[in-house]
Amino acid sequence: MKLFLAMMSHETNTFSNVPTDRGQFEARNLHYGGEILETFRGTGTCVGGMIDAAERHGARLIPSVAASASPAGLVTKDIYGHVKERLLADLRAAGHLDGVLLDLHGAMVTEGHDDGEGDLIQAVRAVVGPTVPIAVTLDFHGNLSGDMVRGADLVVTAVFEGREAAAGILDLLGVASGARAA
Ligand SMILES: [Zn+2]
């Protein structure tokens, strides 16, 4: 089982005039590839739970990009574009995938996208096609949109039980991919 893993998490306050730029992400989390596994393995975070569950299932993880920043104003076009382009490039390079795990927030607003997560999920769906399951974890402060719900197969809010929620999602994906293979 081969699973793609990425995080893009920001709680945006559109009343704030402090832009959330690349420096704000670098100050908290902006990691790539295998560095993501080293940073989050064993932590009680959603990504940590996804990693633990994947390793327990013997799944191969394709870690792409993991970005988060403190709550502030709009996420700049520069950093959102960078994370999105990196994620989609890795997705295209990954070849066949059994599932996609995305740790998002649900209240991200970027310069140009009022529904940041909806834009990202739809872009991922456009690359992987209709049959690869996409599982998403959100913060309790996330706002569900039509683009998010239509684009993803599984959406859970996981702020307190991130590890368990992520592991549960992976169990579901494992069942789903096993059923398809049978
Ligand atoms: Zn929150």
Image (cartoon, rainbow, N blue to C red):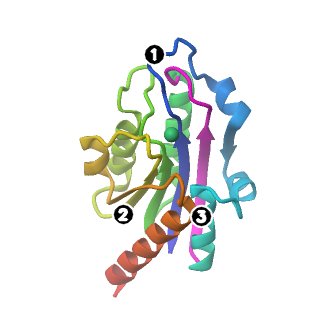
Give the residue at mark 2: 133
Residue at image position (70%, 62%) is 41
The reply to whether discs 1 and 3 touch (Cβ–Cβ < 8 Å) is: no
Numbered disc 3: secondary structure? helix
- Which kind of residue does numbered mark 1 sit on? Phe
Viewer-side residue, 118 vs 126:
118
Segment colored magenta: 58-75
Give the residue at mark 3: 49
Note whether ligand 1 is within 8 Å of mark 1: no
Q: CA distance from mark 1 to mark 3?
A: 33 Å
- Which kind of residue does numbered mark 2 sit on? Pro
Q: Earlier in the sequence, mark 2 or mark 1?
A: 1
* Other residues around mark 2 within 10 Å, as few (<14) / some (14–19) / many (≥20): many
- Which kind of residue does numbered mark 3 sit on? Gly
Labels in figure, total = 3
Q: Earlier in the sequence, mark 1 or mark 3?
A: 1
* Other residues around mark 1 within 10 Å, as few (<14) / some (14–19) / many (≥20): few
- Numbered circle sitting on residue 15: 1
**Quadrant of the image for the C terminus?**
bottom left
Q: Earlier in the sequence, mark 3 or mark 2?
A: 3
Q: Position of residue 54 (x, y in %)?
A: 57, 71
Say if 160 sits above or below 77 in the image.
Answer: below
Question: Is residue 23 toward the left or the right of residue 85 in the image?
Answer: right
Q: Give the foreground label among 3 and 2.
A: 3
Residue at image position (69%, 56%) is 40
Viewer-side residue, 33 vs 28:
28
Q: Position of residue 47 (x, y in %)?
A: 59, 56
Numbered disc 1: secondary structure? loop
Numbered disc 2: secondary structure? loop
Q: Position of residue 15 (x, y in %)?
A: 45, 15
